[in-house]
């Protein structure tokens, strides 16, 4: 009740959008994408409430959502997700004020997903397996770096290779998911970023995809980035969110805060996208047939590089453990760099870039490995064939959903 009048779900959703837009005035970048009415954003910028006022507004909105009685399943699902989103935003306001929680608690309160962390000793077997796969003598990290260096896309070919990769990701996605006419993206090669790639969903079914070339781009990254940032990843996710806003009138889908329970579903789904679009050996086959020649690399070496990729995937969770240790101040930055270099098998400069991302985005790092496991397990559980797997993924895109829902 507010002023004696029961709030409907659409009114509560509009209040949530206003809250998120005003938080962005206190933490620029909190809003990752927005394609709602420009007057809403202009009003938020012109007269934002103070952080204390926003905290009180979030508390009121949580109380209203807690007392909301839905009359249909869509409204019930929207109210449940909205409550989780507001709870995340409320905690983010505390963080902006300087409040910090332990890594695992921070992740759970922002993203509604509690990461499962393994001790680094659990990755010893994976390192031993990689040691047996990679040729040569000497320290494993140095051998892996030398081996990987042979598969770097020449700088003057990155643009062509990435466009070819994204085009194939798009083709395979369109075979299963209907996208609006005129949807498209532009791609830019950039430098001086803490991330490897980024999708800026611009609204109107358009995206700007940026690829960071501070470090060499590996041939093995092309399809991963194409699927993650483009199809069926962030570009397609943005299209579905905007569709929910424009066709259903669900205002909460007009804004995408960076820190929200949707993050593990979106990042995890985007990471899973390459395996959805290229099941089995189809990824390796396309790389050998199209991408290796386009990059001027020898396709006969692709099998060995793919074997390394599969082996190093078993180390993905190690980065979360290192992030937890670093952000909880169990280890120093220098120790964290050494551990990242060891468990990601990268040079110190690449390890530093990884730490720069973690320092900037903190527990957001859980959304990749933990989110991918969440989405993969769900799709594997409900999708018995390729069509069913794509249908399961599209269900995630088109339904108000929380991480916990994918575990049921």
Image: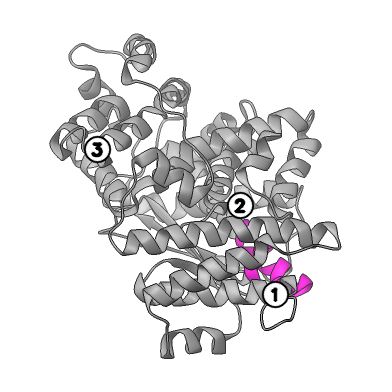
Task: Give the spatial CA distance, label 2 vs label 1.
Answer: 43 Å
The residue at which mark 2 appears reads as 231
Quadrant location of the C terminus in the rendered image: top right
Query: Which residue is pictured at 50% across the width and 49% down the height?
Result: 111
Q: Nearer the viewer, mark 3 or mark 2?
A: 3
Mark 1 surroundings: few (<14), some (14-19) or many (≥20) residues within 10 A: few
Residue 326's label in the rendered image is 3
- Is residue 207 among what the camera can see? no
Q: How many marks?
A: 3
* SS for callout 3: helix
> Residue 359: percent from the left, percent from the top?
27, 49
Query: Is 343 covered by the magenta stretch?
Result: no
Spatial CA span between label 3 and label 2: 33 Å
Position of residue 112 in the picture relative to residue 147 (left or right): right
Residue 156 vertical position relative to residue 224 in the rendered view, above or below: below
Q: CA distance from mark 1 to mark 3?
A: 45 Å
Q: Choose the circle earlier in sequence order: 2 or 1.
A: 1
Q: Position of residue 328 (x, y in %)?
A: 26, 39
Judging by the rendered image, the residue that carries numbered circle 1 is: 1
Residue 268 visible in the displayed image: yes
Quadrant showing the N terminus = bottom right
Q: Are marks 1 and 3 in contact (CB under 8 Å)?
A: no
- Residue at the spot x=35%, y=33% of the render? 319
Badge 3 crowding class, 10 Å Cα cut-off, few under 14, some 14 to 19, many 20 or more, is: many
**69 to the left or right of 205:** right
Q: Residue at x 37, y 13 (%)?
A: 133
Nearer-N-terminus badge (3/2): 2
**Few, some or many residues within 10 Å of mark 2 (<14, 14–19, 20+):** many
Q: Is residue 175 above or below residue 258?
A: above
* Range drawn in magenta: 236-253
């Amino acid at each position: 009740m507010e002023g004696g009048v029961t709030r409907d779900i659409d009114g509560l959703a509009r209040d949530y959008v206003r809250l998120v837009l005003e938080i962005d005035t206190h933490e620029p970048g909190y809003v990752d994408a927005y394609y709602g009415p420009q007057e809403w954003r202009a009003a938020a910028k012109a007269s934002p409430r103070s952080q204390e006022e926003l905290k009180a507004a979030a508390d009121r909105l949580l109380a209203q959502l807690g007392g909301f009685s839905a009359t249909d399943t869509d409204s019930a699902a929207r109210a449940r997700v909205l409550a989780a989103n507001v709870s995340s935003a409320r905690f983010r306001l505390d963080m902006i004020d300087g409040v910090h929680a332990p890594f695992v608690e921070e992740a759970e309160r922002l993203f509604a997903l509690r990461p499962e962390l393994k001790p680094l000793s659990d990755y010893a077997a994976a390192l031993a397996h990689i040691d047996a796969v990679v040729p040569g003598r000497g320290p494993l990290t140095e051998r892996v770096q030398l081996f990987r260096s042979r598969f770097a896309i020449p700088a003057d070919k990155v643009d062509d290779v990435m466009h070819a990769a994204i085009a194939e990701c798009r083709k395979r996605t369109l075979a299963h998911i209907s996208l609006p006419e005129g949807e498209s993206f532009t791609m830019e090669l950039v430098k001086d970023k803490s991330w490897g790639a980024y999708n800026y969903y611009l609204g109107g079914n358009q995206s700007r995809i940026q690829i960071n070339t501070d470090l060499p781009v590996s041939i093995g990254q092309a399809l991963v980035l194409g699927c993650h940032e483009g199809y069926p990843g962030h570009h397609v996710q943005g299209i579905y969110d905007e569709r929910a806003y424009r066709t259903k009138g669900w205002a909460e889908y007009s804004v995408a805060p960076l820190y929200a329970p949707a993050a593990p579903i979106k990042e995890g789904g985007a990471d899973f996208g390459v395996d959805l679009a290229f099941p089995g050996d189809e990824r390796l086959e396309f790389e050998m047939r199209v991408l290796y020649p386009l990059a001027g690399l020898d396709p006969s070496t692709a099998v060995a590089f793919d074997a390394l990729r599969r082996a190093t995937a078993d180390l993905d969770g190690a980065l979360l453990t290192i992030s937890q240790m670093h952000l909880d101040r169990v280890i120093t930055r220098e120790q964290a760099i050494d551990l990242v270099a060891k468990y990601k098998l990268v040079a110190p400069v690449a390890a530093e870039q990884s730490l720069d991302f973690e320092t900037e985005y903190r527990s957001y790092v859980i959304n990749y490995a933990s989110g991918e496991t969440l989405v993969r397990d769900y799709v594997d559980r409900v999708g018995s064939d390729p069509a069913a797997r794509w249908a399961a993924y599209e269900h995630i895109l088109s339904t108000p959903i929380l991480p916990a829902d994918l575990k049921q």
